[in-house]
């Protein structure tokens, strides 16, 4: 059992370290604020324990500050500071080399400069008709999933071009822009 636990901890070490490096001071401010809300709601729960409705509501607030609120605050803070949008300009599926090439443009819509982006890309099987509406579910089991890193300085409201290359990519149908989803995780390493 200790051997398995060691392997699990080692596998979590890199993603956790990468996550901590992407935190902004505003993330820490949000955590301090959420800690204060949790503390005061716990104090009010203890003071108002005879009022079941109010203490039950405060208990929900207390539990949500530890479970849901940190993730929601992280998402909105990073969307505001490092928000991006992308446009795919060129997609070429090579049949003779079993490769897929993608060129695109990444535009910063946030308020701070971006120095590094992790692009989590998903190539989903093409769908037609009603199944086209269910295509986002294919992110769970895509044809190909890759992670690319872009280390380029992007100022607010500016763009940068990127190129992605999938190797060992074999698929019989033609892939187009609507079959590719890119989740962007951008941040500034200067902080």
Image: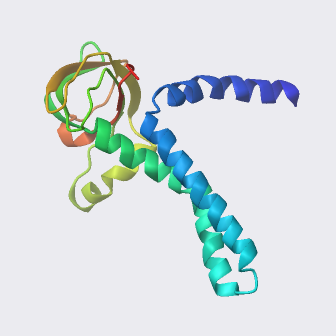
Task: Farthest residue to the right: give it.
Answer: 1
20 or 16: nearer the viewer: 20
Q: State which quadrant residue 49 falls in.
A: bottom right
Q: In this view of the protein, can residue 91 be seen by the observer?
A: no
Q: Where is residue 120 in the image (x, y as percent from the top left)?
A: 38, 31
Q: In this view, does 91 lie above or below 34?
A: above
Residue at 54% in and 57% down = 68
Residue at 45% in and 29% down = 22
Looking at the image, residue 9 sits to the left or right of residue 28; the answer is right
Q: Is residue 53 above or below residue 112?
A: below
Q: Position of residue 48 (x, y in %)?
A: 71, 80
Q: In this view, does 63 lie above or below 156?
A: below
Residue at 45% in and 42% down = 141
Residue at 58% in and 62% down = 64
Q: In this view of the protein, can residue 71 be seen by the observer?
A: yes
Tally the numbered discs.
0
Q: Where is residue 140 in the image (x, y as percent from the top left)?
A: 45, 45
66 or 88: nearer the viewer: 66
Looking at the image, residue 170 sits to the left or right of residue 51; the answer is left
Q: State which quadrant residue 168 falls in.
A: top left
Quarter occupied by the C terminus: top left
Q: In this view, does 63 lie above or below 11?
A: below
Q: Where is residue 18 in the image (x, y as percent from the top left)?
A: 51, 25
Quarter occupied by the N terminus: top right
């Amino acid at each position: 059992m200790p051997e398995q636990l060691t392997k699990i901890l080692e596998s979590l070490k890199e993603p956790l370290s990468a996550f901590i490096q992407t935190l902004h001071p505003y993330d820490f401010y949000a955590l301090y604020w959420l800690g204060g809300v949790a503390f005061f709601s716990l104090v009010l729960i203890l003071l108002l324990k005879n009022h079941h409705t109010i203490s039950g509501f405060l208990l929900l607030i207390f539990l949500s500050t530890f479970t849901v609120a940190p993730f929601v605050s992280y998402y909105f803070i990073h969307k505001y500071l490092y928000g991006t949008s992308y446009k795919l300009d060129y997609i070429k599926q090579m049949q003779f080399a079993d490769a897929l090439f993608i060129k695109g443009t990444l535009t910063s819509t946030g308020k701070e400069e971006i120095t590094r982006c992790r692009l989590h890309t998903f190539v989903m099987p093409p769908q037609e008709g009603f199944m086209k509406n269910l295509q986002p579910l294919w992110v769970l089991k895509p044809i190909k999933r890759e992670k690319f890193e872009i280390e380029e300085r992007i100022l607010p409201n500016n763009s940068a071009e990127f190129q992605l290359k999938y190797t060992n990519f074999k698929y019989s149908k033609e892939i187009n822009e609507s079959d590719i989803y890119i989740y962007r995780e951008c941040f500034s390493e200067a902080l």
